[in-house]
Amino acid sequence: MRSDRGQSAPLGLKAAAACGLLFLHLPILLIFVYAFTTEEKSFVWPPPGLTTQWFAVTWNRPDVWEALSLSVRVAAISTTIALVLGTLCAAAVSRTKFFGRETISLLVILPIALPGIITGIALRSAFALADIPFSFWTIVLGHATFCVVVVYNNAVARFRRTSGSMIEASMDLGADGFQTFRHVVLPNIATALLAGGMLAFALSFDEVIVTTFTAGQQQTVPIWMLEELIRPRQRPVTNVVAMVVVLVTLLPILFAYYLTRDGDQIAGSGK
Amino acid sequence: MSIVALNANPIPAILPGSGGLRGALSDLFWRRPKVLLLLMLLPPVLWLGIVYIGSLFALLAQSFFSIDEFSGLINRQFTLKTYGDLLQAANLDIILRTVTMAALVTLASAIVAFPIAYYAARYARGRWKALFYLGVMLPLWSSYLVKIYAWKLILAKEGILTWLLTKLHLLWLLDAWLSLPVVGGNSLSVSFTGTFIVFVYVWLPFMILPVQAALERVPGNLVEASSDLGASPGQTFRNVLFPLALPGIVAGSIFTFSLTLGDYIIPQIIGTSRLFIGQAVYSQQGTAGNIPLAAAFTVVPIVIMGFYLWGAKRMGAFDAL
């Protein structure tokens, strides 16, 4: 019998861990309170009163809707590209050993390992050198590049657990390569891809640093928020949008966790 | 002999070959796995190679151009003049300030992260373990801007922190701190202290996860053996736990250090008017239009991180990632 079962932690450690978790969570909870405040001009605490009128005001703001629509379209297309590229790369790297395999995994991780400002300004100077004007696609180009790694991480972890003999069995039983992919490989990696896709979507939806360099005059939701933080126009609307953004990113994360919780590597541990 | 070799090929002889393009492709992939491998690798490598590595080289090339001081146009000829500009006192100040901040943020995150990671690794079981995991994951993935915004609310002069300190009759403490020269300011949201707190908050989960991963691998009976042999908790920590957790801490510090070096949004929203590297890059390429100097500035974090990663690798930090 192991002696460390049922042992409880020293009080000091418990307190420090609890304080640390509170430190991580209280600021985000505060956003939810401020979305209902009646105060318009300052960040005064405690809120003088509570109201839901700002939700209606935000609902009728066309600039918020435009930013939201752009963000969702960018995230959807970047996620699709990342899903294709990330899965291909993961399949290649986990199936076979070949020369330069380590380099490929480094290449995939690099866009997220280097600070975002480097990726951003690198893309911008490349656009400038090649005379490419800013457009919807310049944003997508940047986002897809750093979303590949999220899909790749999830897919690689799943491929590692999927036995290669299943593919061989399928081929032995007469299925061709496409049938094997459709009926054997895809069902096995589907949840990992879904989780990776959700995380990629959340990452793209929230990205601001690279986007400021590739968007030009266009506004995604994070760019809209950044503008509001630097030059506030209507603070209560910002509060409401902040709360909505928290909820929009929270749900995919929880769902991705739920999809991969039984695995050896859990989605999202390497943002 | 060649016939034997052909027959030894792993072609399923029972079924007739399937016709059509699809069948032909499928057969080709089976006979020559290298073709399939190449086809699978081509799209991602082309994308990352052209879009990303290509852009990085474009950036690097720009740092060897210079700007004409009179016309403001970029002179596309190889020169080291821009790197000379980088060594001006004002720019060295920026670099030193950023590196100091990154080091302090890394140290503070390690201190705050350790108890959480240790509790999660050693004492949390079952449902609590999942809760701890989500408790770190959710803030990690929450919107970066919203987190900064939340701290703007907290640190504002009329905000919750001032209110709390007033209730506790500790406001004099805050005022005394704010009157200090370098770290103080008019309010916490326009001081280095504020910038520091927000940096620690935003990057903390990046430290907790690798430290926890390192501590998960420390067997509990090692700690017990140490105390059985008469070590005090402090001695156990110094001689047993800390050395074993160190690769995890170094792995986490790669993130906290690199992210602080490159960030330009946090010091812009919560902080003083004195610049960090990221802000210098942003203003050089934007308002000043001096892309060569901006490019040279980005080379600084790349070089620092290069050395950092090299050192981290020697300490075995990559096994803890």
Image (spheres, helix red, strand yellow):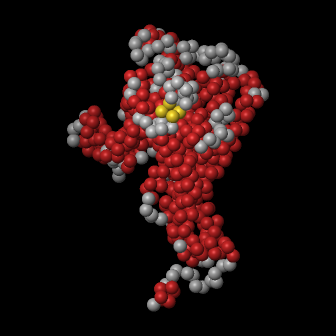
Depth check, front residue: B254 or B135: B254
Q: Position of residue B257 (x, y in %)?
A: 42, 35
Q: Residue A100's x, y, as percent?
A: 44, 59
- Determine if residue B256 is in view: no
Return the x and y of residue B284 as percentages of the image width and height: 52, 28
Q: Residue at 66% across / 25% down in the picture?
A: A238
Please indicate whether residue B125 sits to the left or right of residue B220 in the image: right
Residue B64 visible here:
yes
Query: Which residue is painted at 64% across and 70% down in the image?
Result: A179
Tell me where residue B310 sits by quadrant.
top left
Query: In this orientation, which residue lies closer to the viewer: B291 or B308?
Result: B291
Residue B317 lies in quadrant: top left
Residue for point 42% across, 46% down: B321
Residue B297, relative to residue A49: is it above or below? below
Left or right position of B183 against A191:
left
Give the vertical position of A68 relative to A80 (above or below). Answer: above
**Is B169 situated left or right of B51 in this image?**
left
Query: A118 and B73: which one is in front?
Result: B73
